[in-house]
Amino acid sequence: MADFFSRMDDAKYNQFIDDIISKKPLTDDMIREMLSITDRDSLKKMSDAAVFVKNQYFGNSIYLYSFVYFSTYCKNQCSFCYYNSKNKIDRYRVTPEELRRMCEELKDEGVHMIDLTMGEDPHFHDAPEKLLEFVRTAKEITGLPVMVSPGVVDNDFIKALAAEGADFFALYQETYQKELYGKLRIGQSFEERIQARSSAKVAGICIEDGILTGFSKMKLSSGEPINPSVSDDIESAIVSIRGMQEADPDQVRVMTFEPQPGTPLAETAQASDLMELKVISILRFVFPDRLIPASLDVAGIPGMVDRLNAGANVVTSIISADSKLEGVVNFDRDVSLNERKRDAKSVIEKLHEMGLERGSQESFESYLNRNKTI
């Protein structure tokens, strides 16, 4: 049986693209068919369509985010995360002085935004003024927009972040299947996570949501699937894409689950990134005018290329060439600093090879402010 794209002639294919550009919604069955594609030619047609749609809204411009993982302490016990509180690992917490030095280095590297990320560290959660100081420092020294990824914080904390000038609030749901969520984000409220993003949006901060793929491979150390009833990656992706739509996020991302040492899911077989690439293309169809990241933290610059070719238009997890900070996934945890190649210069060089360009700061900040009223 012919798949979604192979049964289209040129006229129907072009009409499909026109429909997406005009924001005609996809049905669940359409998404299901596209996520089931395995034929190479059809995959190429899907990714080409996604890039075409992206170009209609953003042209060849790609935006770059630095990554400052300033605290690897966390109170949570997420089963998939290397930094969960039960994992016996070395941790660090950046001091205000260290952050100032980092920002001095970052301000001329060519990134569009500073991404301040942490675990849910009580040091900052219990004393919001410490995180507010970090936001203020990053903005004052770099003159750039700031994204903050603090985990779930209350409405007063979010209002304070908005007052301090935070531009983006990132908080990933990981999955919108509640049963699976409970197995991943152990002991954490599904609804409070959604509410925190909603509060940030109401406060005038742009919001980012994100999901995982690779659930069908997830197994506990006992060898049992983490959740057999929701192990189908296709159906999980559909539920999660629809969940993200409800909040109308400004940036949407997907990442393949990467088994992390010392976690309950460490023995899981690594899933292919094919599903992630397909979801990126579908996110471009569902959110044609939104920012979609390609993370360097998963597969470095080669992985970035694949994700940009699937329809992404942002490069995240850029780390200075001499930075010793960690990433969330850290595929290159054991690689020496001079081999990491996750710096802005290396990224921009690769973009030029691909016929892409670093977008202007003006166009990026115009996007951030597009929904704000004077």
Image (cartoon, rainbow, N blue to C red):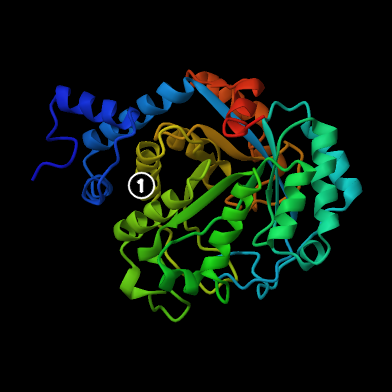
Q: Secondary structure at mark 1?
A: helix
Front in this rendered view, residue 3 or 204: 204
Asked if residue 94 is positioned above or below residue 230 in the image, the reply reads: above
Left or right for 214, reference 346: left
Residue 222 in which image quadrant? bottom left
Residue found at the far right of this picture: 97
Between 229 and 269, the residue placed more toward the observer is: 229
Q: Residue at x 34, y 69 (%)?
A: 230
> In the current view of this chain or complex, which residue is farthest to the left?
1
Choose top left, top right, bottom left or bottom right for residue 280: top left
> Is residue 232 shown to the viewer in this render?
yes
Q: Where 143 falls versus 234 (above or below)?
A: above
Mark 1: few/some/many CA within 10 Å (<14, 14-19, 20+): some
Disc 1 residue type (three-letter):
Leu
Provide the residue designation for mark 1.
Answer: 274
218 horizontally vs 29: left or right: right
Residue at the image point whose x is 76% and y is 41% from the top: 165
In the depicted structure, whether residue 169 falls above or below residue 175: above
List x then y, in percent, for residue 248.
48, 45
